[in-house]
Amino acid sequence: MTETTIASHIVLIHPPVVKPSEPPAGIARLSGALRSQGVECTAIDASIEGLHHLLADSHPPPADTWSQRAWRHVHRHISALRDPDTYLRPDTYRRAVADIGRLLSLAGKASAVRVGLADYKDAHLSPLRSADLIAAARRPERNPFFEYFQERLIPRILALRPAVVGISINYLSQALCAFALIGLIRRTGADLKIVVGGGLITSWMQRPERIRCLGEWVDKMIAGPGESALLDAMGRPAAGKGWLPDYSDFLSLPYLSPGFILPFSASDGCWWRRCAFCPERAERRPFRPLPHRTAAEHLFRLNAQTRPVLIHLLDNAISPALLKTLVKSPPGAPWYGFVRIGPPLDDPGFCRQLAGAGCSMLKIGLESGSQTVLDRLEKGIRLDMAAKVLDNLHAAGIAAYVYLLFGTPAEDRKAADKTLAFVAAHHPCISFLNLAVFNLPLGSPDAEGLVLRDFYEGDLALYSDFEHPAGWERTAVRQFLDKTFKRHPSIQPILRNDPPVFTSNHAAFFRCSRGAGVRP
């Protein structure tokens, strides 16, 4: 490399902890944009690397039977999650996930941190308090990933001599680790800029006064898609848009999946944008789709480059137009993603075509089995249409991963009972269920008239608690779910299908009775 080339280098980092099933799509998009404009970059998935480092460096655990067994078999468990045959043996899969999770939790115990395959909980620091993020930056040595950062990641970054280090923070489970890493980078005294972006940063930047104090540690924060902002930081024009993502830095990494999963976004934001209490609506995020033909061409090219066993479409909701385009121009590998209930999924013939184009599973935001609740939430869903769509997907062999939301201001116990009745009536067509308790987005324009109270302590909180107008409080909602909904004989088998921890990220690999699944 010439001195000029080295000086223009940028390092992109995906910090711990995120489910280690697939690479970070956002950083792949940034890599594609930067490289297309002649900017050299290196993308590092520090989450998958850090988790493997903790597991490889684990010492003999306490003498309890579970921990000892997990430690003895950790390498076998890692191999099992990367073996397609494991997904035909759910008990083996569950044992592997549980044992790996056990070892990770022990790895952080000395720091009073619970590390998981998909979460990070610190007993003393919260990612919802800016003061705690700063504390994580000032004392990175108490982070369980400190050794990985200090011995492997920091030397690698410094050897590249980058002008910019970009850190993508999308989830609360990443925030404390990201700032511990930022603190270590600052300690080196290296002459570089630290830029942070990602979904969580975008949400926090809706109220810039809350994060102003973080400016001591980072040089720039980016809201929304970061391609143009990073190109500008590197002194390059953002010529064109819709760059092809570049996954080349991730292809050989040991993700815990039975082959390479390709995540891909055909749009930012949501094309519906009408649902009450939706964070997208509260934050007024615009809808930015790729042209449908461009999205299909990108998927076809990426499939040829990466040879994935599964494609994960990350759109908040795949638009009907894109679904039709994928039927005409299949990506060449099995795929799944989130959709809204409605046309063209009400057409049995179209659903058969969709299955023929590689669609193995669809995630469906039904939310409620009460028409009154759906109408009040402005979901634009009719229950008779929902029933038809579920029937069509089942007949076509496409697994349905149905999402339900309990405890909204529009719901009461009677409405929740209607949701139970709807799911029970249509259980043969439902492969998986996601049950969530409603969180009110902070600053939601739909919260007028509600009595609000703090949900989590912290100046970076994303949600508010509220006094439910019908007295249907969170405790009552959870009791209903645990003691009534989950115990229904038609619903219990569906809940048992759900892969622990990895949930929808691995669900398509299971050949359950209600969906054909993917055979790698």
Image: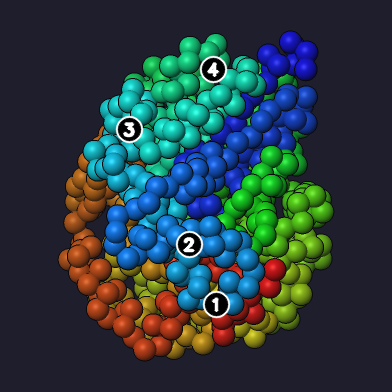
Mark 4 to mark 3 CA distance (whole Å): 24 Å
Left or right placement of residue 35 versus residue 76 in this view: right
Mark 1 to mark 3 CA distance (whole Å): 38 Å
Q: Residue at x 40, y 64 (%)?
A: 69
Above/below status of 138 relative to 261: above
Residue of label 2: 73
- Give the mark nearest the N terminus, 1 or 3: 1
In depth, the one of 341 and 53 nearer the eye is 53
Q: Residue at x 76, y 51 (%)?
A: 306
| Mark drawn on residue 142 | 3
Query: Marks 1 and 3: CB-CB under 8 Å?
Result: no
Residue of label 4: 193
- Give the mark nearest the N terminus, 2 or 3: 2
Q: Quadrant of the C terminus?
A: bottom right
Mark 2 to mark 1 CA distance (whole Å): 17 Å
Which amino acid type corresponds to the residue marked 4 in the rendered image? Lys
